[in-house]
Image: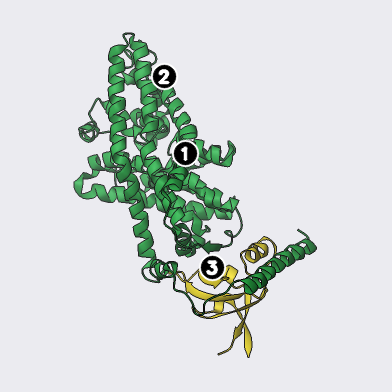
Chain colours: A green, B yellow
């Protein structure tokens, strides 16, 4: 913009405010003295020098508790209903091929989309309530300095936190950011925040290999690794792809308001519907493809019973050499491939491959000697870093309206997973671990 | 008797009248659109728990500015 245009627009704003001020002065009568409003009172607590950050963290924690506590019963109901549907279809359809397609492919696919819905809608609802209450701007205010040091904006913090629940709403929540660069960095690092779907994998591996006394530490270490990597990647992206300062922080702190139930639900619905339409479609088709690959060749797998003979197992064997330096076998390769649909599927895949129920799965992993503590921890790290799931890639595609960024996210995360896992294995071996 | 001070130098409770905005381009426009225009009175309410950004009371509403932005606002402050 030329200097004149800039002067002109400044002059216009200046005159506009002068006009407002003079009009207000001549028409509005003000009482004397300052009024101490409810917002002032709340801010004195919420933005207090010592209480501000603890209160912020407590509100975040409450948000997760709310989202997951509210959604938990629905998740259980959906799982049960789809199990029953699948079993019923298996009985009702006599043709085994069609029965397998409908029960595992279609119903399983729908089920794996729908179990995501309650926690995601719960998070969106909590987010809407927080936004409508006026606290969201305060959260940015409280966290800005910390995020600024990482080359980010105060507004990046909430989306990243949401990532601990699910990376899909995290990526969608970056919409509240007005700088494109800040938003892209936040979007690209958010998958490194360990979502709740990855936890079952950590619990399985750590529980089996580290025993009750160290499993918690191992799981915590993976979460911490995710945060450290997110910080490192934010700094790298800021210095390479998205050069420049984080966008300026000039933000209104609005008056607190009691959130309106109908508008909160409307917000939740409009965002949730986006997830259902985009992520849902992708997860559904991915499940169908996985079904196709895991029951064919139909004869060799005895009608989808023996995954070890399926195409997916062939693929697993084919890419096994890539993972061999890490000490993993073809089953790990298959589990990681399936894990692209959704991370908790890794657990289920091991269940099928080892023919074990979920409760006995840890023992089966140990008795088969699939992992040592070192290779097991490396596996947890790999699960943390490589692409969270197809829904995340699909959401990045939708949000950036391109295929370049999702492709980039896929490549960089997979590369990072190999590098970090390689470093863990190398350091571990140097330290004398097997 | 008054003196010039940058907004980031003010302590909570202190205030003044905006004398000039030294930023330019989009940032200047954004700051002005938020009501940071020459002649406006503002008062620092508090700093964030970490010391940055700063919250000011301006035209009856609360505005938060990072110190980087706040130092572009030059105020005429009544010397006590």
Q: Nearer the viewer, residue B20 or A381?
A: B20
* Quarter of the image where the C terminus of chain A is located: top left
Using the image, name the chain to which the residue with label 3 belongs: B
Tag of residue A379: none
The residue that appears at 36% across and 38% down in the rendered structure is A118
Contact between marks 1 and 2 (CB within 8 A): the answer is: no
Give coordinates of residue A373: x percent, y percent.
Answer: 27, 43
> Which quarter shows the N terminus of chain A?
bottom right
- Do discs 3 and 1 share a chain? no
Residue assigned mark 1: A392
* Occupied quadrant, residue A238: bottom right
> Alpha-carbon distance for marks 3 and 1?
39 Å
Would residue A300 be seen by someone viewing this image from the given angle? no
Which chain is home to disc 1?
A: A
Residue A131 seen in this snapshot? yes
* Residue underneath mark 3: B61
Measured from the top left, where is residue A289 in percent x and y? Answer: 44, 23
Q: Nearer the viewer, mark 1 or mark 2?
A: 1
Foreground: disc 2 or disc 3:
3
Q: Earlier in the sequence, mark 1 or mark 2?
A: 2
Distance of label 1 from label 2 (alpha carbons): 22 Å
For residue A292, the mark is: 2
Q: Quadrant of residue A41?
A: bottom left
**Callout 1: 10 Å neighbours few (<14), some, many (20+)?**
many
Q: Secondary structure at mark 1?
A: helix
Helix, strand or loop at mark 3: strand
Same chain assignment for discs 1 and 2: yes
Q: Name the residue rendered at 42%, 39% in the picture.
A: A388
Q: Quadrant of residue A320?
A: top left
Which chain's residue wears label 2?
A
**Taking B68 as reference, is A358 left or right?**
left
Place of residue A222 in the rendered image (x, y in percent of width and height, measured from the top left)? 35, 48
């Amino acid at each position: 913009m030329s200097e004149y245009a800039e002067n002109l627009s400044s002059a216009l704003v200046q005159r506009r405010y002068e006009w407002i001020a003079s009009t207000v002065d001549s028409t509005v009568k003000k009482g004397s003295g300052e009024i101490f409003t409810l917002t002032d009172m709340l801010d004195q607590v919420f933005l207090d020098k010592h209480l501000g950050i603890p209160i912020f963290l407590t509100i975040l924690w409450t948000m997760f508790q709310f989202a997951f506590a509210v959604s938990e019963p629905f998740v259980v109901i959906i799982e049960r209903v789809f199990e029953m549907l699948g079993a019923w279809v298996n009985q009702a359809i006599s043709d085994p091929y069609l029965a397998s397609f409908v029960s595992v492919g279609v119903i399983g696919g729908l089920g794996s989309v729908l179990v995501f819905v309650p926690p995601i809608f719960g998070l969106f609802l909590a987010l809407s309530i927080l936004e409508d209450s006026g606290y969201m701007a305060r959260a940015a205010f409280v966290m800005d300095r910390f995020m600024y040091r990482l080359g980010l904006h105060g507004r990046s913090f909430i989306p990243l936190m949401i990532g601990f629940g699910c990376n899909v709403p995290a990526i969608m929540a970056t919409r509240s950011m007005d700088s494109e660069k800040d938003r892209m960095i936040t979007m690209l690092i958010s998958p490194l925040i360990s979502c709740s779907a990855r936890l079952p994998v950590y619990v399985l591996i750590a529980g089996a290999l580290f025993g009750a006394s160290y499993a918690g530490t191992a799981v915590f270490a993976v979460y911490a690794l995710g945060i450290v990597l997110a910080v490192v990647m934010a700094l790298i992206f800021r210095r390479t792809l998205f050069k420049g300062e984080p966008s300026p922080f000039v933000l209104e702190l609005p008056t607190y308001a009691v959130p309106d139930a109908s508008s909160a639900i409307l917000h939740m619905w409009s965002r949730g519907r986006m997830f259902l339409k985009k992520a849902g479609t992708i997860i559904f088709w991915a499940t169908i493809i996985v079904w196709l690959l895991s029951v064919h060749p139909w004869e060799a797998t005895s009608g989808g019973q023996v995954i070890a003979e399926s195409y997916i197992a062939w693929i697993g064997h084919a890419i096994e050499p890539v993972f061999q330096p890490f000490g993993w076998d073809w089953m790990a390769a298959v589990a990681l491939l399936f894990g692209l649909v959704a991370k908790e599927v890794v657990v289920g895949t091991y269940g099928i491959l080892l023919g074990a129920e979920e409760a006995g799965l840890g023992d089966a992993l140990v008795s088969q000697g699939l992992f040592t503590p070192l290779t097991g921890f490396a596996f947890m790290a790999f699960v943390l870093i490589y692409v969270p799931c197809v829904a995340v890639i699909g959401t990045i595609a939708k949000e950036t309206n391109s295929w370049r960024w999702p492709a980039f996210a896929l490549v960089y995360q997979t590369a990072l997973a190999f590098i970090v896992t390689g470093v863990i294995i190398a350091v571990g071996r140097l330290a004398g671990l097997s | 008797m008054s003196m010039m001070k940058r907004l980031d130098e003010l302590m909570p409770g202190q205030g003044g009248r905006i004398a000039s905005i030294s930023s330019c381009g989009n940032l200047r426009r954004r700051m002005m659109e938020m009501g940071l225009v020459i002649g406006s009175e503002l008062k620092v309410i508090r700093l964030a728990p970490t010391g940055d950004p700063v919250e000011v009371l301006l035209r009856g509403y609360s505005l938060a500015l990072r110190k980087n932005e706040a130092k572009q606002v030059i105020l005429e402050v009544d010397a006590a």
